[in-house]
Amino acid sequence: MDCYTANWNPLGDSAFYRKYELYSMDWDLKEELRDCLVAAAPYGGPIALLRNPWRKEKAASVRPVLEIYSASGLPLASLLWKSGPVVSLGWSAEEELLCVQEDGVVLVYGLHGDFRRHFSMGNEVLQNRVLDARIFHTEFGSGVAILTGAHRFTLSANVGDLKLRRMPEVPGLQSAPSCWTALCQDRAAHILLAVGPDLYLLDHAACSAVTPPGLAPGVSSFLQMAVSFTYRHLALFTDTGYIWMGTASLKEKLCEFNCNIRAPPKQMVWCSRPRSKERAVVVAWERRLMVVGDAPESIQFVLDEDSYLVPELDGVRIFSRSTHEFLHEVPVASEEIFKIASMAPGALLLEAQKEYEKESQKADEYLREIQELGQLTQAVQQCIEAAGHEHRPDMQKSLLRAASFGKCFLDRFPPDSFVRMCQDLRVLNAIRDYHIGIPLTYSQYPQASRKDVYSQWWRGKEKGLRLVLRRLYPLAIQICEYLRLPEVQGVSRILAHWACYKVQQKDVSDEDVARAINQKLGDTPGVSYSDIAARAYGCGRTELAIKLLEYEPRSGEQVPLLLKMKRSKLALSKAIESGDTDLVFTVLLHLKNELNRGDFFMTLRNQPMALSLYRQFCKHQELETLKDLYNQDDNHQELGSFHVRASYAAEERIEGRVAALQTAADAFYKAKNEFAAKATEDQMRLLRLQRRLEDELGGRFVDLSLHDTVTTLVLGGHSKRAEQLARDFRIPDKRLWWLKLTALADLEDWEELEKFSKSKKSPIGYLPFVEICMKQHNKYEAKKYASRVGPEQKVKALLLVGDVAQAADVAIEHRNEAELTLVLSHCTGATDAATADKIQRARAQAQKK
């Protein structure tokens, strides 16, 4: 244990800091780090190097090379830089490399040097050029801040949704500030800059002078400033050699340290552990590294090589040509277990486990001591937590064995934390491997749940696993299966990313790529072939995209992409096969806008279902187009129907309507539909007659049916006209009598009704007269006609007028069982009792006979 703590360095009395090697770098750099633009992504991310000849007096004749390495120094990409001078490099939260050029254009590259996109920081930046730039991270995404040659600042808080903001001008600023940085406060990005002894804070509205509280006197310039990883704290390095540390709001001072060095440092970054009360800053000069905090002493390291600092959530990564190290505050659990002469329960449990392996009785003594203090649960938890913060697998195993040993003596210790730690460490050790090169720490690795673990791995708008971004698909799948992530969220998405990468391999034929993707993916749930096809189309491989769409089972996903690829006819076939009318309509409207009228109609003619649907659409939206379709197909029957509808919908003048009907009649004759043609001609005659009636009699007749026209004439007292109209249009007598009977009853013209009934023998009989009169509640008139009803309907007529006794006599006389039953059903109450008895006696006599 003494040897284990040999690299611990105390900072005051409350904290220890240790530095250990992550990797031995084997990247064979051709340039010194000081001669390159350097950018390293957080969370164990990749490193980008670009030799910077633009800083020298004479630019090199050879173009610089942009190189991307893993954190272990393994090359990921190398490309010849053919664009303009670069001012700054930085990594986005999605691990995309942002290259800020002098002209304000930002080029975005992937991990493997593949160009993604570019954007400009505005015309003002283009005109004044870029002096300096910062890439920073906010809760909204990755941002870029630019200092122009006019000493003005422009920034965008999220390069994924570019919204440029020009910051207010700093009064009297004639030269570049000695130092500046981007701050994120109150969900907004700000700029903090130093001009001589003054500090200015720029927000979207104003430029404010700010003063750090408790700053040592005599400061004439600020040489360096650093913001903590979480943007909560700020450190300022002054020309007096003092380092001021406080809150980023500049309202509270944490501490101040005199390093007795006035030379400006190369880098200054924060080194703090989450939830730690200790605040420390790491300052690097050419050959010296210093850790300072709220203590009179500092920790100093000698740098043998030119080094670069990368701030992390829980420490600082330090890499040089030969090594990559990690400096951080020793976690509480590790400190309590491993510090010299520790009597913490975790330390005792670790010793007990070691003695147990030696088969020594001291193991029992240590255990009894822990149990007597009631701290065995705490000891197990300490060992589990400390194991998570260890980088060496052998030390992890030692601590986990101790925790497992202690669990055996607890009755109800929940195993979740132990099992989760074992799983997490196995994943962390796998990705920390030299060939993978992602030195993620346990503090950077989410601990709440497996869902959080997954969300940590999936980063950025493209939603790709960090391992997938490095094209390490087998390991990514193994981790998902090991963590038992749902297939839709884990393996399926990895395979989808693999397929998107596969379509970019242009040296393989479309047929082979499509077959390989289908064999690998099959019907894997959660995989969208349309997304993969869209990626293939984006890479210029249209035929491959079409082949991939054949495997997409959802037509709603196939069709939009086919339309985008200008394969509209194929999209129409797919939409028709799906049976989704909305999808078919979408394609039809697209085709209509894409093709000329003749080609569009010809396409429809080859697709009967599409033609039928388009006709339905035109019936409601485009009537003229519908007419053109019927004309093109010589469909005279439908063309006639179209003109009939048009005569009602479009025309208001009788002459126009008659002309439309005449066109319809001609079309029906051409279609050899004589019935429809005759009916149309009759309608034309009726319209002319109705207009004449309106002119002569007044009132409204146009658009009434033939029957309603007759009824209206009768109601108006024009019976002769009604009869003449019936003769002209050959209305049958029965129908005419019904119409006239109903109209006269509605008028309650009983005298005229009686005359009408005696005009000649009724073709409909007289029972309807009885029914109509009773419907109008006129029993007196109904009885007049009941006597005239024929024998076969006599009983029904008598029952309608309420003469049950006479109806019974007629039924008995007819000896009709059905009529007798009908009369009996109308016999109610004491008044009809005698009639019912008479019927029953008649029935009995009939049965005897």
Image: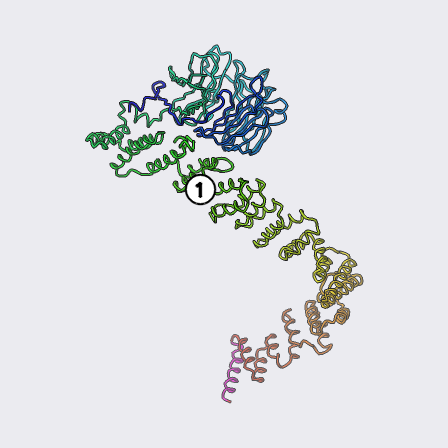
Quick check: is 842 in the magenta stretch? yes
Tag count: 1
Tell me: residue 260, above or below residue 750.
above
Quick check: is 212 in the magenta stretch? no
Going 40% across and 21% down the picture, which residue do you hit? Answer: 279
**Residue 702 screen position, x and y as percent:** 75, 61
Provide the residue designation for mark 1.
Answer: 490
Residue ranking furthest to the top: 218
Give left or right: position of 628 versus 132: right
Magenta segment main secondary structure: helix
The answer to which image quadrant residue 168 occupies is top right
* Relative depth, front residue between 492 and 470: 470
Give left or right: position of 82 versus 46: right
Q: In what quadrant of the picture does the N terminus appear? A: top left
**Residue 243 screen position, x and y as percent:** 45, 16
Q: Which residues are magenta?
A: 830-848
Identify which amino acid the numbered label 1 is placed on.
Gly
